[in-house]
Image: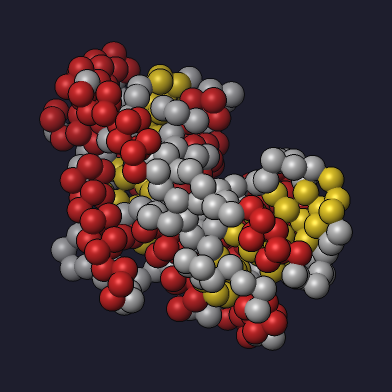
């Protein structure tokens, strides 16, 4: 049995769910998690967790809230030396055999300070690990985000990048990019093409405009992520439920969502075309949405593009999108688990 110390970014749920999926695969090992914000509530149901404040992001009305994000992170930055010391003390007490970080600030730095290998498992490093053929207007955001990722979250020794798109890795980097890591509950369902559209959108700038868009879909529409329940015309608003959500996702015609990587990956695994509206100011979400469009898996729209007129053109291409999606592998679980186990044994990835 090995002792694994695992630090997890706590903004939203995707990082913690990914970490749980990995930990559940290795029940023979002892895991101790470090997380913050939403992370501990998800992780502590199954594993011990130490709540250590770390850097996060605040989203308001379908955009990154810069002022609120600075307010959230200022105390963490002010206390960074004490928080780093706390993590170092935790490492001294726990004596881990291997260390993993999912886009967390302090643990990789602690590892660097004492010379311990650290494996990064996340999606965000696809931004810095590869070159991307972006629209010119996105380069300022790309450069700013790349700088932030490098300065704040790039102190690991090896990087296992999980991504539904796999651009070539830049030469000289200790990085492997693999297809998505999927929960067992996702893998347990057989997809089929139904008639309804699944909509998931938890950050909405203009609810009336969004409502007008989904009402224009000439199909039944199931909506998650909005604080409403019940039926309104062709719309059925449902409360959050993992089982119900995955049932509806596996049997829908296509998906309308933001730019979150986990949501998009699960939709693609089930063979569902995607209309993506990425959160404003969140470059990672834009990049995911951009590749949806570029690879022919659906369309993305930004700015004032939330117009019903885009629907007929999108639906006319459903079979084209489905064909491309179904000829691509969107499950990297077996190779991801193999690489993680290899790191446990050799303190590096198998390049």
| Left or right: where 300 falls relative to 96 | right
Question: 25 or 133: which is nearer to us?
Answer: 133
Residue 27, horizontal then vertical, whole percent: 53, 32
| Quadrant in the rendering for residue 284 | bottom left
Position of residue 95 relative to residue 194, above or below, is above
Position of residue 285 relative to residue 273, above or below, is above
Indicate the quadrant containing the C terminus: top left, top right, bottom left or bottom right. Answer: bottom left
Position of residue 248 relative to residue 42, above or below, is below
Number of labels in the image equals 0
Question: 223 or 215: which is nearer to us?
Answer: 215
Position of residue 90 relative to residue 101, above or below, is above
| Quadrant in the rendering for residue 206 | bottom right
Residue 181 visible here = no
Question: 332 or 8: which is nearer to us?
Answer: 8
| Quadrant in the rendering for residue 288 | bottom left
Indicate the quadrant containing the N terminus: top left, top right, bottom left or bottom right. Answer: top left
| Left or right: where 223 falls relative to 39 | right
Residue 4, horizontal then vertical, whole percent: 38, 30
Identify the residue at horizontal 52%, vertical 39% (top origin): 13
Residue 349, horizontal then vertical, whole percent: 30, 51
Residue 51 visible here = yes
How does the figure colour the protein chain or chains? secondary structure
Identify the residue at horizontal 17%, vertical 22% (top origin): 81
Residue 164, horizontal then vertical, whole percent: 48, 64
Identify the residue at horizontal 66%, vertical 69% (top origin): 272
Identify the residue at horizontal 22%, vertical 42% (top origin): 152
């Amino acid at each position: 049995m090995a002792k694994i110390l695992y630090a997890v970014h706590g903004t939203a749920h995707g990082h913690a769910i990914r970490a749980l999926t990995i930990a559940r695969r290795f029940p023979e090992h002892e895991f101790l998690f470090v997380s913050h914000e939403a992370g501990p509530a998800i992780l502590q149901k199954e594993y011990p967790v130490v709540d250590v404040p770390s850097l996060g992001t605040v989203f308001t009305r379908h955009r990154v809230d810069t002022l609120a994000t600075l307010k959230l992170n200022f105390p963490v930055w002010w206390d960074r030396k004490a928080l780093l010391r706390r993590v170092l003390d935790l490492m001294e007490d726990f004596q881990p055999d291997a260390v993993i970080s999912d886009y967390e600030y302090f643990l990789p730095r602690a590892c660097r300070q004492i010379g311990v290998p650290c494996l990064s498992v996340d999606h965000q490093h696809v931004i810095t690990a590869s070159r991307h053929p972006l629209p010119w207007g996105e380069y300022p955001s790309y450069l700013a985000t790349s700088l932030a990722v490098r300065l704040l979250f790039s102190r690991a020794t090896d990087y296992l990048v999980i991504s539904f798109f796999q651009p070539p890795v830049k030469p000289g980097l200790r990085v492997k990019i693999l297809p998505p890591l999927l929960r067992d509950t996702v893998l347990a369902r057989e997809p089929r093409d139904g008639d309804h559209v699944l909509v998931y959108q938890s950050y909405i700038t203009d609810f009336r405009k969004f409502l007008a868009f989904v009402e224009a879909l000439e199909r039944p529409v199931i909506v998650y992520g909005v604080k409403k329940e019940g039926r309104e015309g062709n719309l059925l608003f449902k409360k959050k439920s993992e089982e119900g959500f995955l049932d509806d996702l596996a049997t829908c015609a296509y998906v309308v969502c933001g730019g979150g990587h986990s949501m998009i990956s699960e939709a693609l695994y089930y063979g569902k075309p995607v209309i993506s509206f990425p959160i404003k100011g969140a470059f990672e979400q834009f990049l995911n949405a951009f590749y949806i469009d570029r690879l022919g898996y659906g369309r993305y729209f930004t700015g004032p593009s939330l117009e019903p007129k885009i629907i007929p053109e999108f639906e006319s291409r459903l079979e084209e999108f489905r064909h491309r999606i179904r000829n691509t592998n969107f499950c990297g679980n077996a190779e991801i688990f193999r690489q993680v186990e290899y790191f446990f044994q050799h303190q590096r990835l198998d390049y």
